[in-house]
Image (cartoon, rainbow, N blue to C red):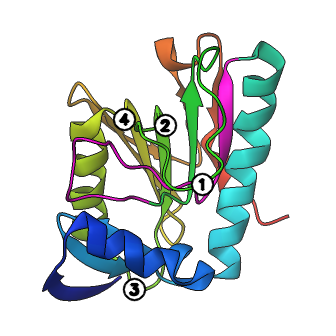
Amino acid sequence: MNVVRARVTMDEFERLIDSSSELEDRLELIDGEIVEKAMATEEHAYVTENVTLLIAPYLREKKLGRSGPKIRYRKLEDHANSLLPDWSFRLNLAEQSVVTRGAVPVMPDFVLEVQSPDDSIPEMRRKAAIYLRLGTRLVWLALPRQKVILALWADGDEQVCSVEDTFDFGDLLPGFSTAIGAVFALE
């Protein structure tokens, strides 16, 4: 994670990312600092795709919400964070239209962040804490080298899940669980 140690306003950040679609897909504002997301590795892409293939069909079948990779989120009253998770979903969208320009003005219910080679776990936890503080209910920190998911819930509960475990989404996705081993499958 490459952090530019200059504080910028939300207006300055939005002008910067509006100036280039390449920057829009790579930069985040985290606690007022510009952060460049690491380029995804093949391993990173597999983990993200696996989560998509595991969770998105359930969301569509049950008509629960929308999901996708690299959707920008920014709560309007928060002027220090414009976040771009690796993958996310939002629930209960009956009255919410699809955002066609700029950031989604609410936080997602679920966020996946996949560790890139240069990401430290403390940096990932810091970002997860921001999501949770702003209203995300569950953050998965996927650690491909260890083949572990750190599941961080808004109520403060934390779970460490290995490839032998099955993860139950509880009331977030009632009746849905997934094998953690499938998240890290490379085939």
Quadrant location of residue 82?
Answer: bottom left
> Label 3 belongs to which residue?
118
Q: Quadrant of the C terminus?
A: bottom right
Question: Element under label 1?
Answer: loop
Which residues, given as a range, are shown in magenta?
Answer: 64-83
- Give residue 137's position: percent from left, percent from top: 37, 29
Question: Counting other residues with Cα less than 10 Å from the Cα at mark 3, is it few (<14), some (14-19), or many (20 or more)?
Answer: few
For residue 177, side relative to residue 160 (left or right): right
Residue 110: mark: 2
Single out the mark in the foreground, 1 or 2.
1
Of labels 1 and 3, earlier in sequence is 1
Q: Position of residue 91 (x, y in %)?
A: 57, 23
Q: What amino acid type should be assigned to the residue bearing mark 2?
A: Phe
Lower position in the chain sequence, tag 3 or tag 2 = 2
Q: Residue at x 48, y 82 (%)?
A: 38
Indicate yes or no whether the magenta region holds residue 69. yes
Mark 4 and mark 3 lie on one chain; the one further toward the N terminus is: 3
Q: On residue 101, which mark appears?
A: 1
**Sequence-first tag of 1 and 4:** 1
Q: Which residue position holds label 4? A: 136
Spatial CA distance of label 1 from label 3 is 30 Å
Mark 3: amino acid: Asp
Crowding at mark 1 (Cα within 10 Å: few <14, some 14-19, many 20+): few
